[in-house]
Every structure is written in C-alpha cells, then in structure tokens.
Amino acid sequence: MKRRSFLKGTLATGAAAVAVNAGLLTPSTVLADWNAKAFAAKTTDDALNSVYGSAAAAASGDIKLKAPAIAENGAVTPVTVDATSMSGVESIAIMASKNPMPLVCTYNFGAAAQGYVSTRIKMGETMNVIAIVKAGGKLFKAEQEVKVTIGGCGG
C-alpha cells in the first residue's frame, strides 16, 4: 500500500512541475488579488475610498459586531461580524481606527453566501473596531470601542 501512495504522490508532483514549466500555473492566476493602495492607507477614509470608492457609510443596527470590551492581548483580538439579517451582502471589511494601517481585512462574498466573518485582529492600543458591510451597492457600518490592556493585566 505504501508503494502505491508513493507512486501517486510522485505522479502528482511531476504533473504539477510540468504545468508550472508550461506556464499553466502562474502567480497571477494562482495568488489572490492584493489591493496594495487600500492596505497602505493611513486613515480609515482613505482605506474605504481605495476599497469601495467612497467613505460614506451609514450606521446600521442590522450589523452585529462582536468584540471584547477589554482585550487582554491586543495581538489576537477576536472579532465577529454578523450581517446575515441583511440581504445581498457583497463584502465585509474590518478596520482598526488607530492602527498605523487601519484596514485589517476584506472579504468578498458570492451571491449565495451569507455575510458572516470571524477572525482575530492585531491592535496596538485602545481604539474603535469598525465593520463595513457592502450590501445592495450601499455601505453600512458598525463600530465598537475595544480597550487594549498593557501586559494582559486586565486593568
């Protein structure tokens, strides 16, 4: 049985090498798109303009932003954005307002997907976490302040 697995692995590796050498697998088709301008922006408005073409987002109660009121470790702050009650969610972006580069992440959804994201973000100090949801061609947002304690002392 081990011989059969070895032969399958060797064949798969050889096929991948041939595809790379033939130009069928190039980084432009394999890697995800990177919006360098948006992730290099120094303000939340600049980042929103780079991602969505507008910084005008209306506050919405339909977005449930869940983050801890006090984060004992700013390096791994859990954040959840739930926009499943909204129809036609196209994308969700998470921003940390006082980070040197405030845009933390963006998620684009297909037509049948539900707007729900859970991740961990890095925060250097106490600041607002902002969730931006694009639904039906309009931008909506929810904000929550997260206090980051120094040294994880909880105070």
Image: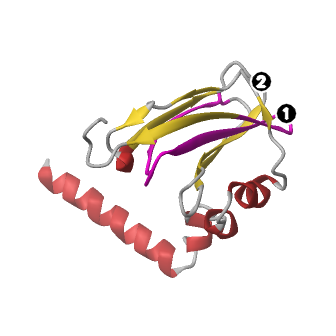
Q: Secondary structure at mark 2?
A: loop
Question: Which circle marks residue 136 in the picture?
Answer: 1
- Residue 65 is left or right of residue 38, and the answer is left
Q: Residue 117, percent across and down?
A: 55, 34
Q: Quadrant of residue 63?
A: top right
Q: CA distance from mark 1 to mark 2?
A: 7 Å
Query: Front-most of 109 and 55?
Result: 55
Q: Pick whichever, 105 or 151, lies toward us.
A: 151
Dot 1 lies on which element? loop
Question: In the figure, 129 relative to 85: above or below?
Answer: below
Q: Residue at x 80, y 40 (%)?
A: 57
Residue 140 shows in this picture: yes
* Residue 9 included in the magenta stretch of the image: no
Residue at 26% from the left image edge and 43% from the top image edge:
152
Q: Quadrant of the C terminus?
A: top left
- Give the magenta range: 113-141
Q: Residue at x 85, y 33 (%)?
A: 136
Q: How many marks?
A: 2
User: Residue at the bottom extreme?
Assistant: 21
Q: Which mark is residue 50?
A: none
Q: Is residue 9 above or below residue 149?
A: below
Q: Nearer the viewer, residue 4 or 117?
A: 117
List x then y, in percent, for residue 56: 84, 45
Q: Is residue 125 above or below residue 137?
A: below
Looking at the picture, which amino acid does disc 1 mark? Gly
Residue 133 among those drawn in magenta: yes
Q: Which residue is mark 2?
A: 87
